[in-house]
Amino acid sequence: MQIALVVYDRFTALDVVGPYEILSRLPDARLTFVAERPGPVRADTGFLALTADRALDEMPSPDLLVVPGGPGTTDQLENPVLLDWLRAADATSTWTTSVCTGSLLLAAAGLLRGRRATSHWIALDVLKRYGAEPTGERVVTDGKYVTAAGVSSGIDMALALTGRIAGDEHAQAVQLLTEYDPQPPYDAGSPDKAPAHLVEEFRAGSRFSRT
């Protein structure tokens, strides 16, 4: 199984590294980081870079593609190179997936029109502009399209997909070996649970509230 993990300038690292850790444990999987051009691509913090081993056009038909989000998403929403590749790769993919605001890129490419999808809670309304049906669920599967909410939910998405591809027991083994057993010290991981003033602060300052 050929798995393409897309990176672009100012992507969020966990969006793509979380799914990478889980999907790399699929039987016979070959994972490749791809970008518009090969070479190092810097994440949103500026401290970390991942190396894209191939350009997009060198991997035209992956079996599974993962599109992360991040602050750099807005710069990619009108990037014809990336959007054209997404359309072409999707035409033959078995699974087309995204994490966080990566779903906006799938939507901008016209792939989520009329489909249920999720994204980071700050960006959910933007999905509507591209004809998708936003939902606040953590992981949404609509046909071959699997979208995950913000950042950490990419791990859940990858585990769910692993179960679909390799079976529940294999997915449970991966969860066990990665010791994915979240027990966070706070219960503020969604806008429904977090202090209201924090939610409003981040919503007001979001780049999506100004687009």
Image (tube, helix red, strand yellow):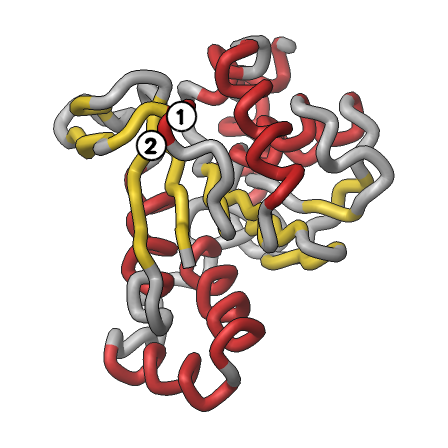
Quarter residue 43 falls in: top left
Q: Amino acid at mark 1?
A: Leu
Residue topped by disc 2: 34
Mark 2 Cα-neighbour bin, 10 Å: few <14, some 14–19, many ≥20: many
Quarter residue 103 falls in: top right
From what the image shows, is residue 197 above or below residue 57?
below
Sequence order check: which comes first, mark 2 or mark 1? 2
Mark 1 Cα-neighbour bin, 10 Å: few <14, some 14–19, many ≥20: many
From what the image shows, is residue 6 above or below residue 148?
above
* Residue sitting at x 55%, y 37%: 199
Residue 186 seen anywhere in this rendered image of the structure:
yes
**Secondary structure type for disc 1:** helix
Contact? badges 2 and 1 (CB < 8 Å): yes
State how far apart marks 2 and 1 are (Cα). Answer: 6 Å
Q: Residue 157: give x, y in percent of width and height.
A: 51, 60
Q: Amino acid at mark 2?
A: Val
Q: Residue 50: give x, y in percent of width and height.
A: 19, 33
**Secondary structure type for disc 2:** strand
Q: Residue 136: give x, y in percent of width and height.
A: 69, 50
Which label was assigned to residue 56?
1
Question: Residue 41 vs residue 112: left or right?
Answer: left
Q: Residue 33: give x, y in percent of width and height.
A: 30, 38
Question: Residue 38 vs residue 8: left or right?
Answer: left
